[in-house]
Image (spheres, coloured by chain):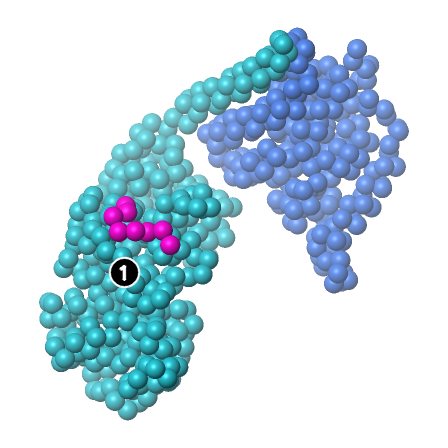
Amino acid sequence: MPPLINPITLFFASVFTSNILLTNFLGMCSFISISKDWKSSFGLGMAVTFVMTITAAVSWAVLHLVLIPLGIEYLSFIVFIIVIAAVVQILEMVIDRSSPALYLSLGIFLPLITVNCAILGAILFIQIRSYSFIQTVSFGAGSGLGWWLAILLLSAIRERVDKNPVPAGLKGPGITLITIGFMAMAFTGFSGMIAVQ
Amino acid sequence: MTTLVLGPLVSAGITAFLALVIALVDRVVNDYGEVTIDINGGKKTFTARGGAPLLGTLAGLGVFVPSACGGRGSCGACKVRVLSDVGPHLPTETPYLSPEETARNVRLSCQIKLKKDIAIELPDELFSVRKFTATAERVRDLTYDIKEVLFRLEGPDAIEFSSGQYVQLVVPPYGDLGESVQRAYSMSSAPSDGKHVELIIRLVPGGLATTWVHKHLKEGDRAELVGPFGEFRVHDTPKAMVCVAGGSGMAPFKSMFHDMKERDAFPQKDVWYFFGARSMKDMFYLDELKALEKEWPRFHFVPALSEPGPDDAWTGDTGLITDVLDRYIKNTIGKDKGLEGYLCGSPGMINACINVMTANGMSESEIFYDKFA
């Protein structure tokens, strides 16, 4: 029985109060490595949002049309990974053909996203929380936007931090992890406002 | 029981279905039809199927743009100037391009996908680059860590090159090396024998290609060579050649000297050849080169040992090759027609020799060497 949470509420909840990055700590590797400058963060965030929305919808269909009817939900990890890889591959080809400008800004990030755990994480939440299709799409898009928002915030902070004196031992990933910790604490302040599960 | 079968079947089925979708999308979306590749303003035109990277498409047409990484975008060697519009530079290309190259629309040919008719510019000599299959006819030790390998070309069965050029040896996967690698080696055989290519290869500890040659390659084994490449050649001026080599840097000079002597080419040029080694166990071709010196009056051979051993019975020059070179330029070599430098060896040796040569008034624009060592 799907919970009765309103898709619009769910959308905003997944952007802000249950941000997939800052409350669930998913997609950390690219979050830390690609957030050095604002421009690539923007591109990667856009790509994650794009892929997350589409793979969430496709995976929901696979889950409800194939896995659940056959009673083999335990295969979801393997199947979802394959679905993500295939969807990313198809998206790359379609974007390359249809929009060279979009390919230029998204293209190089797409292969990175195949192994981004935030995507798989979001899809597994959809399974665990038994979302409906509409909820799935709004949760996928919201989580993507939330990831995008978080990486943009972090890149802005990192660009400022870089211009300031940082103790030698903390330069680079050290100060970045501390920064992320503060951001996560700030976002934790929202927790409990809306229950997403 | 059913669950046991159902699981693998369904995951395999889903995978197969998605693979099919990808193949179909690839068929439909990646179909760019026939495209025309125009090289050097109409000198050569090809038609090929679009959709693949330029580098691979050109190789399929028999035009081999040099590439060390095989199209993975990690060596930056496959640069090509594109004259038609193929969109802006990709983030995967920019790290390998200088601002001038970016301005001239130089691209990495492995990164640009062939989507429509394209016009490109290539150095003319690339048209003579071929991929050869060859058999190692003779493998012999020159020193304890240098081997001479003579390849007999089989398909195509002859190569046209100028002395001083190099080929890329394609090393097949072996041992822990999962994929084939290519490394550049100067040809030491003379261009007059186009049916053979001889390489002189020193064992580099941990080197992928040199380890293969030293530990695995046997007479009768097959290998592939791609070439010829390179701008290292004798320049047509009356100036005396001051050639300096160490170790396997011998290779291009062996080819040049035999070629010049055979054809009596550049008869105005005097040739000075400095070859540096540590002790007799690093020295090779000594008798051959001394014989050449006797037969060919304008050739002067100066071998030098930096640390001759007690048993070496060395009567030639001793000292670092740079010091020997410095002495000869100052005292012995006639400078009335001017001097040109030709270097082949380790980057350290090349830099040290450039310093000695420029300190003796030679201009850097007249010192030639290949940078791939």
Density class for disc 1 (Cα within 10 Å; few <14, some 14-19, many ≥20) is some
* Residue B217 seen in the current view: yes
Left or right of B274 on screen, residue B194: left
Say which of B182 and B86 sits in front. B182
Residue B9 left/right relative to B188: right
Q: Is residue B59 magenta?
A: no
Magenta stretch: give its range.
B215-222
- The quarter in which the C terminus of chain A is drawn is top right
For label 1, the residue is B140
- Please identify which colour was used for chain A in the image: blue
At label 1, which amino acid type do we have? Arg
**B216 in the magenta segment:** yes
Residue B79 position, x and y percent, is 38, 51
Question: What x and y, as percent, mark residue B261?
Answer: 13, 70
Q: Main secondary structure of the magenta part?
A: loop
Chain letter of disc 1? B
Q: Residue furthest front?
A: B311
Q: Residue A75: percent from the left, percent from the top? A: 65, 19
Look at the picture and state if B228 lies above or below A15: below
| Residue drawn 50% across the image and 19% down it | B16
Query: In what quadrant of the picture does the N terminus of chain A appear?
Result: top right
Q: Indicate the chain coloured cyan by its letter.
A: B
- Going 41% across and 27% down the picture, which residue do you hit? B30
- In depth, the one of B227 and B149 nearer the eye is B149
Indicate whether B274 appears above or below B165. below
The residue at the point 80 percent across, 31 percent down is A18
* Residue B303 drawn at (x, y percent): 28, 79
Query: In this picture, is B212 found above or below B2?
Result: below
**In this rendering, does residue B342 appear at all?**
no
